[in-house]
Amino acid sequence: MKEKGRAFTLFLLFLGLAACRAFQSGPTPSPAPTVSPQQHLIFHNGAILTMDTTRPEAQAMAIAGDRIEAVGGDAEILALRRPGSVVVDLQGRTLMPGFVDPHTHLLNDAEQYLEMSLAEAQQVALENGITTIGDLYVTEEFLQEMAELAKNGQLRLRTSLYLVATDNCGRLQGEWYKEYAPTHTPGEMLRIGGVKIFTDGGTCERPALSYELQAGEGLGDLFFSQEELNSLVAEAQTAGFQVAIHAIGDRAVEQAQTAIAAALAGQPNSYRHRIEHNAVIRPELLPRYGEIGIVPVIFGPYPVCNPFGPPPPPEYQSWEWPWRALLDANPGLPVAWHGDDPFFGRIRPLDDLYSLVTRNEVGEDGQVCESPTWQKVHTITAAEALPLMTRNAAYALFRDEEVGRLAPGQYADLIILSGNPLAVEPEAIKDLEVWLAMVGGRVEYCAAGREAFCPSWR
Ligand SMILES: [Zn+2]
């Protein structure tokens, strides 16, 4: 009995140690960058695009500490001024939420691909107006690196990590991810977002299509049978994870939709399971996103400057990058944009916004590559595109109660632009500049010569 009792105590101790180890080796929840709670800031005389449906536009905003205090007209917000308030005149310029990129490789590929340090990659993001990201290729080793960065207070972007259950060739990576539970605590700079699964080619082998891209080459590569993918998704869901499934070709999209539907078994998608890229969608698959409640995460530019391959046969052209049709088939669905940086042009969401609105692409050198006319039918408006890049992208990361829209209680994550993307000509969107990027009330980037727009705390 005594022996048994001791064994049990040892067993409990072991369990305790195991739990402790998992917690300590995971990212310790890190606080938002701190500003003094006493700091009080007022922006006024601007065009404020809130992305908040209850009040889409405003002229002024007050920020207390790291949060938004109030959004409204100039007179009502200026009345909140108190001793020590810093007041910034926007001079008619545009202020909006910082861009949220829910699928990027900016950090995991910083060193190898971009030849940048993690600090430099974050700086590039901030200079281009990105304040929150999801990093979509996180190995256990990279997870440790990110945890270290956050612990040292060097994480400047709100970052959600997606742990790889497969590599980009569909090779299973084991169940290591289950040791690191997803977290959703408001204010965390570093967070476990979910699990990444690759279901077809695109970065390894070829996308799985219903037609041959080049005669004699076959229909592309699915990495799993439907049953295998179903069990991968179900397993991650049972462990409490959101899944983000890479699917480029229409056969991969269909398989991913079916696997998510099977895991949800008719319940609402409270896990916010996502499908990444969705580059080629067969028309009958369009309404399935809304029916199942899946969050589609889509590209800005169609690759015209450096095409992936030959154009699709004419009868399949309407399946490619069909964002107009995707939005029309799924009213109210939180469709999200992604940059998938650094693999698609410059790390510049304003280029992607320009692409969504015109279908043209801005190349690495800044030159415009005109898209084919059959792509032009898929333009969406700037008013439709901006929520994809802010509010909906935050939803895809479970951060919509923190960032992605400007409303009282949200974190003060915002940017100032040289002009209003809703008011300028579509051609001018690519020429807009980011003058300020703020994260949690803290100025993280101020463009040279634009210091008047960047509050300095005294
Ligand atoms: Zn990616």
Image (cartoon, rainbow, N blue to C red):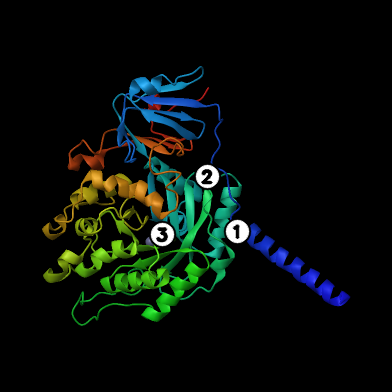
The residue at the far right in this view is 2
Q: Position of residue 37 (x, y in %)?
A: 56, 30
| Foreground disc of the pair 1, 2 | 2
Mark 1 neighbour class, 10 Å CA radius: few under 14, some 14 to 19, many 20 or more: many
Q: Is residue 140 visible?
A: yes
Amino acid, disc 1: Gly
Q: Is residue 160 left or right of residue 288?
A: right
Q: Position of residue 108 (x, y in %)?
A: 47, 58
| Identity of the residue drawn at 48% across and 51% down | 159
If the image is split into quadrants, where does the N terminus sit?
A: bottom right
Q: Is mark 2 within 8 Å of ligand 1?
A: no
In the rendered view, tell whether residue 338 sits above or below residue 249.
above
* Residue under label 3: 272
Amino acid, disc 3: Arg
> Mark 2 and mark 3: span between their CA atoms?
19 Å
Q: Position of residue 3 (x, y in %)?
A: 86, 76
Amino acid, disc 2: Gly
| Identity of the residue drawn at 72% across and 64% down | 16
Which label is found at residue 187? 2
Mark 2 neighbour class, 10 Å CA radius: few under 14, some 14 to 19, many 20 or more: many
Mark 3 neighbour class, 10 Å CA radius: few under 14, some 14 to 19, many 20 or more: many
Ligand 1: give its quadrant. bottom left
Q: Report helix, strand or loop for mark 3.
A: loop
Q: Position of residue 240 (x, y in %)?
A: 51, 64
Q: Which of disc 2 and disc 1 is earlier in sequence? A: 1
| Res 254 quadrant in image | bottom left
Q: Is residue 141 left or right of residue 2?
A: left
| Foreground disc of the pair 2, 3 | 3
